[in-house]
Image (tube, rainbow, N blue to C red):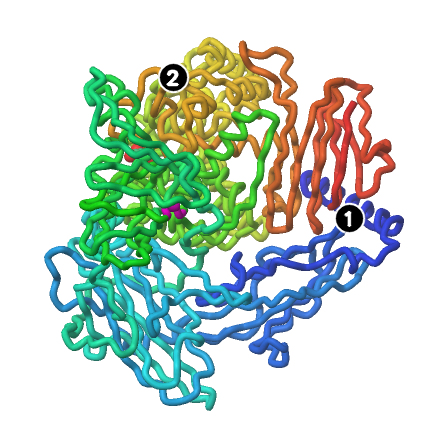
Amino acid sequence: MKKALSITAITFFLFAGIILFTLTRCSKSSTETTIVKDLRVEYMKNPVGIDVTQPRFSWKMESKERGAAQSAYTIIVSTDEAFKKTIWNSGEVLSDQSVSIAYGGAALSPATRYFWKVQVKDQTSRKIASTEKAFFETGLMDSGWSNAQWIKPLQRDTINTVPLFRTNCVLNKKIGSARIYSSALGIYEIFINGKRVGTPAENGSTRYDEFKPGWTDYTHTVSYLTDDVTALLNKGNNVVAAYVAPGWWQGGIAHGKYGNPDLGFMAKLVVNYTDGTSEVIVTDPKTWKCSVDGPIRQGDIYNGEVYDARKESAWASPGFDDSSWQTCGVNTDFKGEIKAFADPTVQIRSQLQRTPVKITRYEGINDTGSDFGMVNVKETYTDTVPVKIIPLAKGQTLVYDMGQNMTGWIKFKVKGKAGTELTARFAEMLNDEGKKSRGDDGPGGSLYRSNLRSAKAMLQYTLKGTEQGEEYHPSTTFFGFRYCDLTATDNIEIESLTGEVVGTASEEVGTFSTDNPSVNQLFSNVIWGQRSNFLSIPTDCPQRDERLGWMGDIEIFGRTASYNADLAAFFQKWTVAVRDGQRNDGAFASVSPHCWVGWGQAAWAEAGIIIPWTTYLMYNNKGILVENYPAMEKYMTFLANQADKKYKYNGAGTDYGDWVSYVHTDNRYISVCYYAYASLLMEKISLALSAGKEDEYAQKAVSYRTLYNQIKQEFQSRYTDKDGMLTQDTQTAYLLALKLDLFSTEAIRQKAIEHLRQLITDNGNKLNTGFVGTGVMMPTLSDAGLIDVAYNLLLQHANPSWLYSVDQGATTIWERWNSYTKENGFLPDGMNSFNHYAYGVVFEWMYRYVAGINPDENRPGFKHILLNPTPDFRKTFPEGQKQLMQADASYDSYYGKIRSAWKIETDGTVKYDITIPANTTATLRLLLSNEKSEILESGVPIKGAKGIASVNQENGKAVIELTSGNYSFEVR
Ligand code: BGC
């Protein structure tokens, strides 16, 4: 009750502040400076092919004025662009909500494009209307596939060539519009009349998606996509064609999950004629033909692609003679549901394209007395821009350095004789000295590939011998690499070669910079780790024979990831796979989509609760909580069932513990802590879903709190000594117990905090934690008042630390703190990825504590922002460390851009630049150096400053309630 009252009071105060401010300030019409933009449906821009019955709308209000806020909105949805055929008018809704508002009109029809717009009223009741073209289009919904069948090659060829499918169709009338709905068992591309199908954009360009239809748990779900193909069809004869590669359905990466299934393709083409009639063409074994003699001889995610350009033909175009092609068979391997794809797709991210920074040609090996010797370098090119033609003679090797570890493939143009074979191999690192003792697997300067394990990760391209040169990139595989080497069976010329970054094209929304170049490089490594491992689903690594949806990795990195990029739709879709993979007893899998490994392992399985909660906090996406709640409850039942005779609260399995830590913490201890963590989150989630005190969710919240208390009690008897301190004396153990408030008294908690400080300082101001401990480390230290210790760890360069890998030359985050050291070479372990995002979690702390940008759990999605910037106010520094003097972060939330920047001046004054987006408010907390500290805003004393609703003091901090706008504070 008390809490409710104070929130009401603050709201009133803020509102009064806004009005007061508005009256004094808004002489200029706010409509001139305020716009409504970035309209989204289901968190996506103009999605095509969604099967949601009540899509959710979001928009941003943007204003140069302070205190701009929405007081009402009206949403109009129509089936025509001119809004003559309105199907829903929300009417004026007095509300400040602008994120995730559900459609409330009559039932939507399948395969229909709906246009929508919104008009908002600002704080002065001025109307501002959206101006951008906004629409969404429904998919097939429950209208069905008109008997389309999964088709497959009738016979399996022995070498697994990528099969081609085609059909001819005659369209007799003038075409008004056309859509193709399609899916594959495998990954596929469609072509119409020889042209690749993509998404036409307003500006006339086309966006192409890769690895369609993305990765799902095929025991339950496969996605289908909807494409507008109006512009590709003609009156008369047309050809619809597709190829399908194994992708995640077949091949090594499926780890036998689906047996040994056939590839399959399914499509429904709906052509609407201008006269109002329509025609439907579907995949059917009788009318479609198939060939296994195409140019992609093999396409496999782990192993790479084998491509014979001599096999290219106009197979996807009209006029092609397909008389030697076979009829198709029907694929019955898939028993699940076909669901509309709703997510940003995987794309070539052309703005991230890499040109090589260095090319080395070598021939033979020099014996240097080491095990493997050194490559015999003939030539080095560092001036590769603008593009230079590089000759490659038989017997020589070219090593390309992209300057950045990344995920994708190479695209090259090559000239040479028909039949010449060009082989490209990929690696993240080069061998350094050619010594086994340093973990090298070949001569110094050659590709280090041991860490790929069984993944062949290579391309084999056979030239067709075109005189002007021939261009190629693969499409059925991807590589995690910084380096690639090329060899050829005959002399050729490489006319160009670039690295193309391939991954889920989520919009990047976070920026961070500081005055410390190493920290800035660390941020770049975190971002590249994310770009590399968000490929259809969140994966552990992009290079070796895994590339799987390891739940522990994303459990740890998910929050950071959602500051870096907009993952509202991505996570919602991925949790379908999490639910699909859940075992009957409620255990969540260790990898989702599930394959290969098991279920119910602590800190991995809990991603099934943690990720939906994160998505709710960051995007006000309550839908993801609603959808996942029953699965989460099932998981809680699984945990309850782990009780044994001795202990009631054991938590989940102990397979992974504090994975790859330097110091071991008992795995069971971690399971018990994560049980407590899960129950705390379930309490919060239940409260978020509760509509009032008495409802079922509210009661569930109470029972989860009780559960937490019981776990805590048993934890204390199991893991604390007579003084209340932990029997597990490790950093990870103390961090978890502090984060989850598991100590019995405040006095013991304080002692534990001091002990944790000691554990870290005694370790030379270094951490020694693995995935789990590192995952919670920095926020826990800060919340415990040890922000100085956190800064010591951030700016530590010795092993293990974040900056250690930066100093060793890392351009992505590594799986291990010491995956490679200049001192000792490679870690001698097959599990040694140079592109694993988990340790990138430090940037959660950078955004949430250093810059201090936090969502408010009670008004999620950044409707209200808790802004607690915490500059580096350390008074003493570990040897060799300097104070961080500046940080500047921004996060483009669903309400608009939030910025928090600070700078410590030489005289000790601290400047803060703050941006609060329109239609949000913030509580800013600024540390005061003493009672007499003075705060100025834009050069004037804060009390009179515009847009500021109130200023108070609390525990040595100024607590400032802000309305939207840009602010410059100075604390002296
Ligand atoms: C993966 C990890 C994963 C772990 C589970 C590894 O092989 O690469 O990132 O979480 O297995 O133990």
**Residue 67: image tag:** 1
Decide which of 110, 415 is in the foreground and name it: 415
Magenta stretch?
496-500
How far across and how far down the image is residue 759, in percent?
46, 12
Decide which of 437, 684 is in the foreground and name it: 437
Q: Which secondary structure class fits the magenta region best?
A: strand
Q: Badge 1: how crowded within 10 Å, few (<14), some, or many (20+)?
A: many
Name the residue: 62% across, 32% down: 851
Mark before the other along the chain sequence, 1 or 2: 1
Label 2 sits on residue: 728
What amino acid is found at the position of numbered circle 1 in the picture?
Gly
What amino acid is found at the position of numbered circle 2 in the picture?
Gln
Q: Secondary structure at mark 2?
A: loop
Quadrant of the frame with the N terminus:
top right
Tag nearer the camera, 1 or 2: 1
Where on the image, by quarter, is ligand 1? top left
Name the residue: 19% across, 75% down: 322
Total of numbered circles in the picture? 2
**Is disc 1's CB within 8 Å of ligand 1?**
no
Decide which of 193, 258 is in the foreground and name it: 193
Compared to residue 693, the image places residue 38 above or below, namely below
Residue 24 magenta-drawn? no
Name the residue: 59% across, 16% down: 882
Compared to residue 121, the image places residue 493 above or below, namely above
Q: Badge 2: how crowded within 10 Å, few (<14), some, or many (20+)?
A: some
Between marks 1 and 2, how big is the CA–CA gap? 51 Å
Q: Secondary structure at mark 1?
A: loop
**Is disc 2's CB within 8 Å of ligand 1?**
no
